Image (tube, helix red, strand yellow):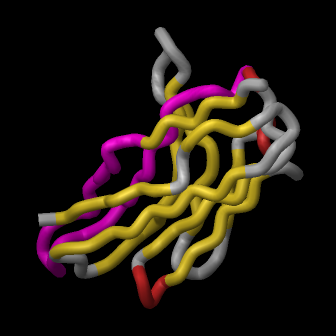
Amino acid sequence: QVQLVESGGGLVQPGGSLRLSCAASGSIFSINRMGWYRQFPGKQRELVATITPGGSTNYVDSVKGRFTISGDNAKNTVYLQMSSLNPEETAVYYCYALLKINSVRPFNAYWGQGTRVTVSS
């Protein structure tokens, strides 16, 4: 009923930049927040950044000043502009949305399929 489709991953050199996009579609009644998580090999998924429809943002400390999350409420889309990337940030990046599909159901978490970001020379 709800789909999150990511794009923008790929190979980037150390110090380079990359922009991820994620569009939510389907039966969406209300969005509480959208954001990005990442998963390093052999590790649990971790928060990167989130944004609310009102524009409030939250970042993990390690990306502050280098990553910028933004959103387009009309398109149910969230972006992650990443700069000064380092090889240790090679991971699969997942789009996340906390949303309701109708007025009765509670907020529920939805995930994209993941997009791989590789930082390497």
- Give yes or no for residue 90 being in the magenta stretch: yes
How many numbered discs sit on the rendered protein? 0
Question: Which residue is nearer to you in this view: 11 or 115?
Answer: 11
Quarter of the picture containing the C terminus is: top right
Asked if 67 appears above or below 100 in the picture, the reply is above
Left/right of residue 97 with respect to residue 83 in the rendered view: left
Considering every residue shown, the one lying at the far top of the view is 42
User: What residue sits 45% from the left and 62% below the top?
Assistant: 22
Magenta highlight range: 88-114
User: What residue sits 44% from the left and 90% below the top?
Assistant: 74
User: What residue sits 57% from the left and 56% below the top?
Assistant: 20
Q: Position of residue 53 (x, y in %)?
A: 52, 78
User: What residue sits 41% from the left and 52% below the top?
Assistant: 96
Q: Position of residue 66 (x, y in %)?
A: 84, 49
Quarter of the picture containing the N terminus is: bottom left
Left/right of residue 44 with respect to residue 107 in the rendered view: right
- Give yes or no for residue 65 being in the magenta stretch: no
Q: Position of residue 56 (x, y in %)?
A: 66, 70
Asked if 103 appears above or below 4 in the picture, the reply is below
Asked if 121 appears above or below 116 in the picture, the reply is above
Asked if 121 appears above or below 62 in the picture, the reply is above
Considering every residue shown, the one lying at the far bottom of the view is 74
Left/right of residue 34 with respect to residue 63 in the rendered view: left
Question: Which residue is nearer to you in this view: 18 or 105?
Answer: 18
Q: Position of residue 118 (x, y in %)?
A: 62, 30
Question: Which residue is nearer to you in this view: 48 or 121?
Answer: 121
Q: Quadrant of residue 107?
A: bottom left
Question: Which residue is nearer to you in this view: 4 or 46?
Answer: 4
